Amino acid sequence: MTTDIILETDRLYFRGHILADLDAYCVMEADPDFRCYVGGRPRPREEAEQRFMAGLKPVSDGLSMMAAVYKPENKYIGRCGIYPHFNSDGRPIHGEATLGLYIGKAYWGRGLATEAGRAFVNYGFIQLNLSKIVTMVRVEHDASVHVIKKLGFELVDTVKENGPIFIILPSTRPGFTE
């Protein structure tokens, strides 16, 4: 399993997941405050381990959720990345990706999600030559909505799936705001 850095910012680096990330991943997945904004209930350790192991594969095409490591502590703090955007038939849409930013609660409020988001949006549009990046955030999570708007995304639609969710996307490379 490679631990090569795929993408880097001032305070973060991103690489494929490794077994050493498992405990921190499971702690995040068990946190009800974290899980309520990323898709539901806290996950028991066994279920989190199964999900982690299923996703433990090398990053090959750049479209993957990667381990987010906080450089000052050299510590795994979440998973971030862009992964294939799928159509209603479950097939990947060529040239499109979905942005995911999952940072552990202990690191909220430090601007790390914005930093990671900027890096992955640039990476997707510039290095991977994507034509569109989409993302979804829960409308009641003001901090997530704020981050996504700072990245230049705009509300396109809302859906109700276990609560209201924004579906936001730029059709071209978004402009960033401070």
Image: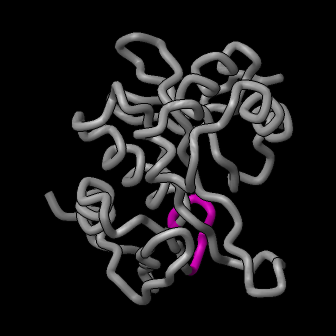
Q: Quadrant of the N terminus?
A: top right
Q: Is residue 108 at all visible to an observer of this figure?
A: yes
Q: Position of residue 178 (x, y in %)?
A: 14, 57
Q: Is residue 58 at all visible to an observer of this figure?
A: no
In the drawing, does residue 172 fall left or right of residue 5? left
Colour mode? one colour
In the drawing, does residue 69 fall left or right of residue 106? right
Q: Is 129 a magenta residue? A: yes
Q: Position of residue 62 (x, y in %)?
A: 69, 51
**Residue 90: which quarter of the image?**
bottom right
The answer to whether 99 is drawn above or below residue 76 in the figure is below
Residue for point 63% across, 25% down: 26
Count numbered badges in the picture: 0
The answer to whether 109 is drawn above or below residue 101 in the figure is above
Q: Is 55 a magenta residue? A: no
**Residue 177: which quarter of the image?**
bottom left
Q: Position of residue 85 (x, y in %)?
A: 67, 73
In the drawing, does residue 9 fall left or right of residue 82? left
Q: Nearer the viewer, residue 64 or 31?
A: 31
Residue for point 69% across, 31% down: 44
The answer to whether 147 is drawn above or below residue 5 in the figure is below
Q: Position of residue 83 (x, y in %)?
A: 67, 59
The answer to whether 42 is drawn above or below residue 72 in the figure is below
**Residue 96: which quarter of the image?**
bottom right
Q: Nearer the viewer, residue 2 or 52?
A: 52
What is the span of residues highlighted in magenta in the rendered image?
A: 125-131
Residue for point 85% across, 39% down: 54
